[in-house]
Amino acid sequence: MDSPLQIVWALGMMAIAIALSAWQRLGLEWNLAVATGRTVMQLLVVGYVLAAVFALRNPWAVLMVLGVMLAIATIVARNRISKKVPHLLPLVGGSILISTVLTLAYTSLLVIRPQVWYEPQYVIPLAGIVLGNAMNGAAIVGERLVSTLNNSQLEIETHLSLGATPQQAIAQYRKDAIKAGLIPTINTMMVVGIVTLPGIMTGQILAGADPLLAATYQMLVMFMLAFATLTTTLLVSWGICRQFFNQAAQLVLW
């Protein structure tokens, strides 16, 4: 994909998709066109930025890129959950940050072991993958838990009146929300390599890497995603549960 003509031919698929939408009168032509334009512009900008960061190999530049990615992931996840729950933005951001740092630290220190911790070749792509999945996990568990707690007032207050603590009264709701947040990751792990070849492995194979080496890198990525997503969902669900009870252990709906 180093020729402008190849990119033009790639864009041809979107032109055909827009034509098909118009033919079937789906009304998706504008959405597809905007999505195509944004994809091209965003990836070109990211490509130029990362090229500069890779050339600099400066820890502050790497941290700046990671900070922007974290901020966007936090805002997107918070917006998908709720704008009414107090202190949700720092809760989601802190949860994603902790899970990402733990995952990258473990991977860098024990698995990849680069010469410097801020090696952009490893830190930025791996952080991007982890942040994206942590964001999705936080959004799923948060939205599921907030919705369930708001719709289960009678059951929760019944448990509280019978002497249950807030943690006991909502324990099952929290477990169900965490399981829901892990479903996409677990489902992917169950069929990886059989039904689908994930992006990392596919990209490496297309770039000419040895398939076995690409498979080992994909194993690492899948294990990272499982750990990071579980850590994020645990932290987010714990924080949200605390926001639904006051100091007198009374249920507060948002």
Image (tube, helix red, strand yellow):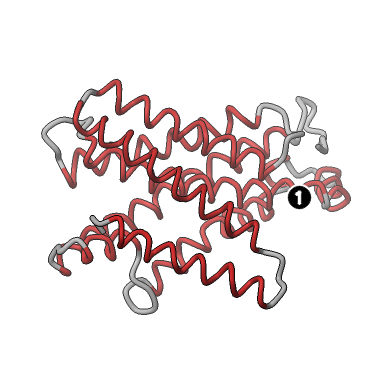
State how many labels appear.
1
Residue 122: give x, y in percent of width and height. 23, 42
In the picture, which quadrant includes the C terminus? top right
Tell whether 254 sits left or right of 215.
right
Residue at the extreme front = 5
Where residue 75 sits: x, y (%)?
A: 59, 35
Taking depth in this image into account, of 249 and 208 the one nearest to the observer is 208
Residue for point 46% across, 61% down = 185
Say which residue label 1 marks: 147
Instruction: Identify the amino acid type marked 1.
Output: Ser
Judge the density around disc 1: few (<14), some (14-19), many (≥20) Cα neighbours within 10 Å. some
In percent of width and height, residue 134 lies at: 48, 46
Residue lying at 81% horizontally and 43% vertically, measured from the top left:
160
Residue 94 located left or right of residue 116: right
- Provide the secondary structure element on which disc 1 rests: helix
The answer to whether residue 128 is above or below residue 32 is: above
> Residue 109 location in percent, x, y?
19, 38
Left or right, 92 with respect to 119, comes to: right
Q: Nearer the viewer, residue 178 or 130?
A: 130
Q: Residue lying farthest right?
A: 154
Residue at (17%, 45%) from the top-left corner?
Answer: 112
Residue 21 quadrant: bottom right
Screen quadrant of the N terminus: bottom left
Query: Residue 24's image quarter?
Result: bottom right
Is 78 or 25 nearer to us in this picture?
A: 25
